[in-house]
Amino acid sequence: MAAKYKVVIQKPSGGITYDLADPSYSIEREALDPIGAEIVEVSAKTEEEFIAAARDADALIARNRRISAAIIKGLRNCKVIGLGSVGADTVDVDAATEAGIVVTNVPDVFIDEVADHTMAMFLAAHRRLRLMHQLTVEGKWMEGRPSFKDIPRLYGQTIGLISFGNVAKAVARRCHAFGLRVIAYDPFLAELEMTAVGVEPVTSLLELCQRSDFLSMHAPLNGETHHMMGEREFRSMKRTAIFINNGRGPTVNEQALSEALRQGWIAGAALDVFETEPVDTANTLLAMDNVIVTPHVSGGSRDSRTRMCAFSWQNIKDVWEGKAPSARTYGPSPPRLPHATCC
């Protein structure tokens, strides 16, 4: 019997997916098998090959390939593009909206993991773990403690949060437990939402930069936030400050960040994301001894992967059935399909 729905996904190169998705799609099939949907992996080398294979798809999964305006223009039947991430910057959302295609995401899946990773990264940077590891393995035992002669205790320091969404709120809760003063800048949020959880709102990004001992980026990526951290912002920070980014790489001008670290405008950085990913191994940030880096893994865990798969595929099923997906969506409202069940 022919499948009722066809879902197309780019087959990963090298046989492994970035998010460690199950190659048998066992979790996804729990949602899709009951409604007669098939998952088709496409080994497309080019965008043109992908368009040819996905032309009659009822849904796309935005994994392993950016879903561009050209791809969207070539789709005939697609009703929904599913994301297994919080952000939607891997899909041309404007093109999808124009084509009447819903783009779904999973905004609540990775909150605790990203908050935990943010804490791990800035604590490691603050306590100079990269340097301490190197001194230990090189037999420079006696050089460790003197390295802390100018490092203040964590208690009483100020951490600034750029944007105050769910992850930033989770970071704030953790920071309070460490005795940190928490301030935040988010022009789209009522001040009471910050003060109610013990966070001080500030009126400008520059003020946040000037006051923070640690500055953590949590803004989504869009036209307004692209390169929102640039030379002016880094120059305004304390020379002892540490910058953390576990959000979106392009929110930061990496050239300005490199210069800030090289010139000593700031003391260090902890980065899980980069402007271009996978990051080029020749990127100057990777060679700096006052920078700690990880390969965009802040949302990773056994539990988050399972929840991501379950929620992202349930979102697709909901759209097909004419329901509003449980997660935040981009683009037009889900269409009322002929087989939708009326409430």
Image: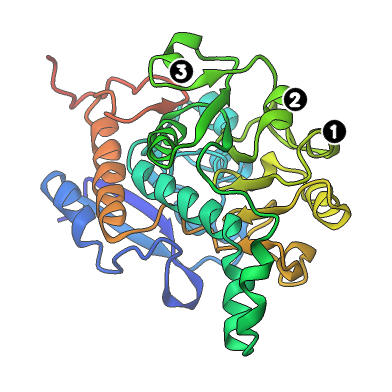
Q: Position of residue 64 (x, y in %)?
A: 50, 59
Q: What residue type is labelled 3?
A: Met
Q: Where is residue 111 in the image (x, y as percent from the top left)?
A: 37, 41
In this figure, which residue is indicated by the disc labeled 3? 194
In this figure, which residue is indicated by the disc labeled 2? 206
Q: Which amino acid does label 2 sit on?
A: Leu
Tell me the CA gap for discs 2 and 3.
18 Å
Tell me the CA gap for discs 2 and 1.
8 Å
Q: What element carries label 2?
A: helix
Residue 337: image quadrant is top left
Mark 3 or mark 1, which has the lower sequence index? Answer: 3
Q: Which amino acid does label 1 sit on?
A: Arg
Q: Position of residue 161 (x, y in %)?
A: 56, 32
In this figure, which residue is indicated by the disc labeled 1? 232
Q: Residue at x 79, y 65 (%)?
A: 284
Mark 2 or mark 1, which has the lower sequence index? Answer: 2
Q: Nearer the viewer, residue 165 or 198?
A: 198
Task: Evaluate if marks 2 and 3 touch, with contact meaning CB atoms under 8 Å apart.
Answer: no
Q: Which of 170 and 195 is in front in this view?
A: 195
Task: Evaluate if marks 2 and 1 touch, with contact meaning CB atoms under 8 Å apart.
Answer: yes
